[in-house]
Image (tube, rainbow, N blue to C red):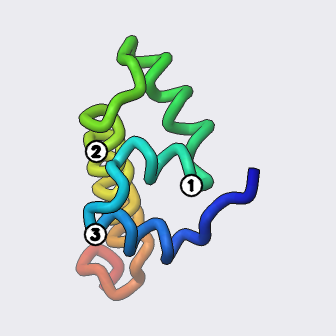
Amino acid sequence: MVKIEYDELVQLLQDGKIGHLSFVLESDSEKDFLKWCDEHGVEPSDDAAEFYLEQTEVSAMDKQVIDDENYGIWN
């Protein structure tokens, strides 16, 4: 099965044509999401996928801030 390009997935999600679950399962995050579900004892669902995306986005943003040399602690 051919994966849909990430930008196209984002557009489909924003347009309401797919839900969060489809978004995650069609993206490169599929295996990580399914592993996360297993580790947290939850069934893959739209709500779980939305929560997973929120958590991974926050984590990525935290790492970006910490890795930024212009961040206050590096001055």
In the figure, residue 16 lies in which quadrant? bottom left
For disc 2, the neighbor class at 10 Å (few under 14, some 14 to 19, many from 20) is some
Q: Residue at the spot x=73%, y=58% of the render?
A: 2
Residues 15 and 44: in front is: 15
Residue extending furthest right? 1
- Side of 72 where 19 appears, left or right: right
**What amino acid type is highlighted by mark number 3?**
Gln
What is the x, y in percent for residue 57? Answer: 34, 57
Q: Mark 2 points at which residue?
A: 50
Q: Quadrant of residue 50?
A: top left
User: Mark 2: which amino acid?
Assistant: Glu
Q: How far apart are marks 2 and 1 (CA)?
A: 13 Å
Relative to 64, is 35 above or below? Answer: above
Q: What residue appears at the point 36 percent right and 55 percent down from the top-left corner?
A: 18
Q: Is mark 1 on a helix, strand or loop?
A: loop
Q: What residue type is labelled 1?
A: Ser
> Total number of numbered labels?
3
For residue 14, which numbered disc appears in the image? 3
- Coordinates of residue 35 in the picture (x, y in percent): 55, 27
Q: Nearer the viewer, mark 1 or mark 3?
A: 3
Mark 3 to mark 2 CA distance (whole Å): 13 Å
- Tell me which residue sits at (41%, 26%) in the image: 44
22 above or below 34?
Answer: below
Residue 27's mark? 1
Instruction: Assess whether mark 3 and mark 1 are in contact (beta carbons under 8 angstroms).
Output: no
The earlier-in-sequence mark between 1 and 3 is 3
Q: What element carries label 2?
A: helix
Q: Where is residue 43 in the image (x, y as percent from the top left)?
A: 39, 18
Image point 56% across, 38% down: which residue?
32
